[in-house]
Every structure is written in structure tokens, then in C-alpha cells.
Image (cartoon, rainbow, N blue to C red):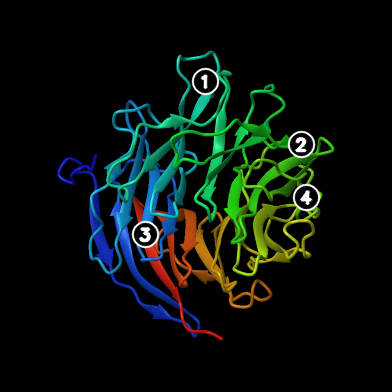
Amino acid sequence: MVTSTVVFLWFSFTLVARAETTHELLLGQQLSINHGSKKVSGAAIEIDEEGVRHLAWYEAGKDRHELLYVSIPPNVDTVPSTVHVNTNGPSVAAIHQSPGLAIGTTGEVYLSWTSPQSPLSKNPFASTLRLSTSKDQGQTFSTPITVNDDATPTSHTFDNLCVDPKGAVHFAWIDERTGKRQPKTYVTRSLDQGQSVAKNLQLEGNTCVCCRTALTSAANGTVYVAWRQIIDDKFRETVVARSKDGGQTYSSPVIVGNDQWNFPGCPHRPATISVDGQGRLYVTWYTEGPDDVPGIYLAMSDDEGQTFSPRKKLNVSTSTFPDKPQMAVDPLGRVLVVWEELSPVRHEIFLSYSLDRGLTFSPPQKLNAAKAQHPAIAVNQRGQGVVSWVEHAFPNNVMIVQDLKFLNHK
């Protein structure tokens, strides 16, 4: 159901005008969503070919957590009413990450999210992976289905999803059904617009327990999944596996950066992946290996993830701590990357972009006005983009939605 803004007086919507132009990129107007003092996750964000911006996020409540969604048409001055996706369903398990969000080939809206496992188990982190689907442009969502096909009292989370060119919905997540100390990456797919999912498939290797999975699909239908894998019981490496048969089987994972990061725990920092129109695969990730210096990196593959280019460092500041990169790539290979930069007195969002398929990048540009975190970014096939983040303007948490557009560039 669509919720009236009158009901949610703690929600206020304002427009902040902004237009800033470089020689290649236009930063358009900003919309802001004021959540008051309520805690929120970062947003999952997409932009469709009509320029409609789709956002979904979690919000902490006193008795339960909520999943919210809104679609924002282009050229509007106010944010429309939000949709409470799980009003009549289970609560959201936690708000430490955003939901998964993907737009289908005929406009369906797919949201992946986790709820506390029921009946309650002795494991406080036990969760069930859900899929909620809208076939009316996000006005209403169907009763969620369960994605994991087991009832093990454990976590099924750190999920992501994408839609391939044929409309199949692909899922990846971290699953501990094989044992608490042996988390694995699992995948599945839906061939009927989210009405059901196939048998879950376990991928190779031991997965780092809390670095979110990432998914993307190429124009030829190849599906890629990335996660952080534990190598030799000590190294935390970003890896990528691919499927050439529509998600029925996946290749063995390939190490992307060979960082040799020896870390005795889970860094809680996921990778992001995307593909351009010529099939080049892009991966961005965070690591501290092998020199114990935090960095944001990018690598590319022109052979469907079988080998990767040497890693390229994107952050340039030596006085801040870079974190949580997010990336989007359009069909022409124009790359957008946003990330956080932290210091004892700063918490900022930076943007850098490439016009030459990842070979060179613009100097990082600050986007936020107040203390900020949780960046997310998306771009459509026409070079229209959108970036979001959460600013903390005490006592309010404000979600910023910033329009972007590549200018004509040869």
C-alpha cells in the first residue's frame, strides 16, 4: 500500500537547488528526505531509462524495523509518498546494510531483504532471506517469498540481486547453513518475475562472514558475482565467479587484486561490480594489503573475469581513511565511483569518474555538506546518474539524492 505523508509527520521532504558543471559531468539538483532522529540504513538506488530514481532503505523503529521504498520521477520539486513494503509482513532483521534493489526488464521492482527467523531460534542472528516484488511501478508489493531453501537456524544475509537481459532475477548472499565457522556464498534465480526461486547453489570456497556480495549481468547474459573469500585461512581477497548458462552453474572464483591482506576477522567492506556495453568487467573494493595502508582500488577484466588488470588506486588523500566504495558504469564505459573518507573531524563523501573505460579518473570531488556516510550510486544507459548518502545534521538524519549527468563526450 502507498502510505500518506500525513501519517508520517516525522518525514519531511525538501528540495535543495544545486547545479554545478565540470567539462564532463553535470551535478544537478538535490532532493532531501528528512528522517528526523530515526536511524536509517543507506539507500539502495537505481535509475531507469525514463530517469525515474528508485530508492529503498531500512528504518529503525521502537518495536520493529521497516523496509521503505520510493520512486522519484524526473523534474519534480518534492519527493512522493513512501511505500511501507513490509507493513503486513515480518520485520526487518537489522539496518546495518541497505536492501537489495533491481529493476526488471518490464519495469518490475525487486527488493531483497532479511527478516528475523521464525520461529525464534537460539541464534539471535538467525535470519530469513526475502524477496518482495512490485509489478505496478512500486505502488504496491506482493507478499514476500523466501529465497533460502533451508530452515537452518542461522543467518542468510549480506544479499544482493540483479536482473539479466532475459528478465531472470539472480540472487547472491552469505549463508552459514553448513556450520557457524564455515560461511559460504550461495546463489539462486527466479525465472517467473519473483513468484518462486530455483534450488540454492553453493559456490566454492570459504566466504568472509560479513562482506556483502555483489552481482551484475552483461549484455550477453553472463552473470557475475563477487564476494570476499578467505584464502589459506588468513588472506581476505575479493573474488569473482561467472555464469555462462543463466545462473545454473558458476565458474571457480578468480582472485581480483591479489592483495595478500592478512586480517584476522571480517572487515565488513564489500566490493561492487559492473559491466559496460563492450563486456568489460569492473570491480571496486577496499583493502589494506599487503602494506597495511587502507585503499580504494579498481581492476578490470576483458575476458569475462578470467584475468584482471593490475589494481588502480582511486583515493588520493593521505590524511583520511577511505571506505565503502560504490560504483556504476554506463554502456559507453563511463565509470562513477563514490566512497567515504574519514578522519577524527571529517566524515565525507567523494566522487570520481572515468570517461575512458577506467584508464584515468578525475580528481576526487567532495559532495556532502554535513557529516555523511552510506554512499550509493547508479547510472542508466543514457548517461543519467544518481547518487545518495545520509547526512547527520543533529538531531536529524537526512538522506540526500543528487542528480548526475554525463555531458556529451567523444
Under mark 2, the amino acid is Gly
- Residue at (73% x, 41% y) in the render: 229
Q: Residue at 67% of width from left, 38% of height from top?
A: 266
Residue 333 appears in the rendering: yes
- Secondary element at image label 2: loop
Residue density around tag 3, few if under 14, some if 14–19, many if 20 or more, within 10 Å = many
Element type at marker 1? loop
Mark 4 and mark 2 in contact? Answer it, CB < 8 Å: no
Q: Nearer the viewer, mark 3 or mark 1?
A: 3
Q: Earlier in the sequence, mark 4 or mark 2?
A: 2
Which of pointers 1 and 4 lies earlier in the amino acid sequence?
1
Label 4 or label 3, whichever comes before in sequence order: 3
Query: Is residue 320 among the parts visible in the rendering?
Result: no
Res. 124 mark: 1
**Image location (x, y in percent) of residue 255:** 78, 51
- The amino acid type found where label 3 is placed reads Arg
CA gap, disc 4 and disc 2? 11 Å
**Horizontally, is 129 left or right of 2 in the view?**
right
Judge whether 36 appears above or below 364 on screen. Answer: above
Camera-nearest label, 1 or 2: 2
Considering the numbered disc 4 on the image, is that residue within a helix, a strand or a loop? strand
Looking at the rendering, in which quadrant would you find the N terminus? top left
Q: Amino acid at mark 4?
A: Val
Q: Which residue is mark 4?
A: 254
- The residue that label 2 is drawn on is 205
The location of residue 14, given as percent across then percent down, is 24, 60
Specify the amino acid type for callout 1: Pro
